[in-house]
Amino acid sequence: MLVHGPRGLEVEPTWDAGWRAQLVDNLEILVHQLWQVGISEVFADGSFAEDKDHPNDIDGYFVCDLDYLASGRLQRDLNLLDPHKVRTWEPSSRQPYRGYPKKQLPMWHAYRVEMYPHVAGLSSGIVDQHGNELEFPAAFRRSRRDGRARGIIKPSQDVAP
C-alpha cells in the first residue's frame, strides 16, 4: 500500500509508485545496517507514511543505548557498513539541497532517508502545538501538515528477502 497507493494506480494516477519504491529500497539498506549492529527497534514515517503522492523522503528513528550513541561507536559501526559513510547527526554536517529551505544530513543526500537515534527519556527536538518537547515516538505519531494522529511503520526482520 505504501508503494502502490491506498486505492491503486488506476484510481490515483499521480501516485509516484516508482519513487516510493526507490525510497523503500533505500530505507531497506539503512534498516539492515541497523539490524547488523544489533538495533532491532526501527520505525519510519513522514509524508511517506501518509497519502502524499510524491513524498520528499522517509523520516525515521531507532531506539539505541545512550552509551553506544554517546561513545561514537554507533556512528563508527554504521559507517563501517555503509559505502557512503553518511552516518552522522552533527548539525554542522548538514548541507543545502537545491530548492529546499532546510539543510539536510549526509544520509538524506545519499538515500533520501533520515534515521535518527532515540534514547528513552531524551527529547527529539520536535515540539508539539503547545511548545512541549516530544520524544520520537510521540512526535512521529502526528502529522506535521495538519497535526492529525497517524501510524508509523516498523520494518520486520521476520520477512524473507
Image (cartoon, grey):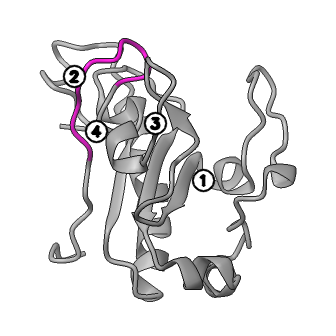
Q: Which residue is mark 4?
A: 3
- Using a 10 Å C-alpha cutoff, classify the residue at mark 2 as few (fewer than 14 neighbours), some (14 to 19) or many (20 or more): some
Element assignment for label 1? helix
Q: Which mark is residue 19?
A: 3
User: Where, quadrant-wise, is the N terminus in this rendering?
Assistant: top left
- Using a 10 Å C-alpha cutoff, classify the residue at mark 3 as few (fewer than 14 neighbours), some (14 to 19) or many (20 or more): some
Mark 1 vs mark 2: in front: 1
Q: Label 3 to label 4, Cα distance in Å?
A: 8 Å
Considering only vertical position in the picture, is 72 above or below 149?
A: below
Circles 2 and 3: CB atoms closer than 8 Å: no
- Using a 10 Å C-alpha cutoff, classify the residue at mark 4 as few (fewer than 14 neighbours), some (14 to 19) or many (20 or more): many
Please say whether residue 150 is one of the residues in the magenta stretch.
yes
Q: Which mark is residue 111?
A: 1
Question: In this orientation, does residue 79 appear?
Answer: no
**Residue 63 left/right relative to 73:** left
Kind of residue at disc 2: Leu
Q: Which residue is mark 2?
A: 9
Q: Mark 2 or mark 3, which has the lower sequence index? A: 2
Considering only vertical position in the picture, is 69 above or below 108?
A: below
Kind of residue at disc 3: Trp
Which portion, as a residue range, is magenta?
143-152
